[in-house]
Image (cartoon, grey):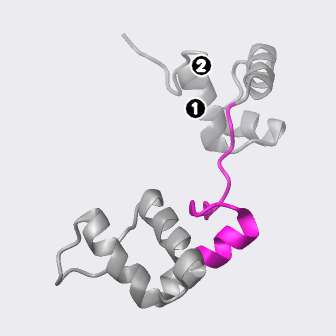
Amino acid sequence: MAWSNEQRAFAVEMYFSTKPILAVQRALRPRYGIPPRNTVPDRKSMFVWAANFRVRGSVVQKRVGAQRTVRTPENIDRATRSNLQSPKRSARKHAFALALSNRTVRGILHEDLHFHSYKMII
């Protein structure tokens, strides 16, 4: 089950103040209305949350995966200038020339510059 950041913070506070995991699990049930048969965070989860809090000072989960390329004003300006210099070049080739991902350049062209990646034929 996915635990909210508020529940994680409460569990870490209780863990630091009352050490026994069982006491923390028992305190979670009435506080958040968890029924007796439903699961509470296990001891491994609480140890990980406490370790993360000690290292990072936060119980919020660290983002995993590849970092997203940001459509910054600088990148938008570079894509605009590149597109004005050679408007017949494909978005893929613009992306390669600008050292940006193909999806980022297509997003800039479509959302920021209001260009379309295909010719509109009437």
Quadrant housing residue 29: bottom left
Q: Amino acid at mark 2?
A: Asp
Reply above or below: 32 against 103. below
The crowding category of the residue bearing disc 1, from other C-alpha atoms within 10 Å (few below 14, some 14 to 19, many at least 20), is some
Q: CA distance from mark 2 to mark 1?
A: 7 Å
* Amino acid at dot 1: Gly
- Location of the C terminus (image quadrant): top left
Residue 32 in sight from this viewpoint: yes
Give the percent coordinates (x, y) of residue 8. 48, 67
Instruction: Answer whether labels 2 and 1 touch (C-beta < 8 Å).
Output: yes
| Residue located beneath label 1 in the image | 107
**Residue plotted at (52% across, 81% down):** 18
Rendering coords of residue 81 (x, y %): 80, 17
**Residue 95 shown in magenta:** no
Marking on residue 112: 2
Circle 1: element type: helix
Residue 42 in view in this figure: no
Q: What segment carries the magenta color? A: 49-71
* Left or right of 28 on screen, residue 87: right
56 to the left or right of 106: right
Dot 2: what SS? helix
At a point 74% along the width and 18% down the height, the residue shown is 80
Q: Earlier in the sequence, mark 2 or mark 1?
A: 1
Q: What residue is at 71 percent from the left and 27 percent from the top?
A: 89
Q: Residue furthest front?
A: 18
**78 up-or-down from 46: above or below:** above
Predominant secondary structure, magenta span: loop
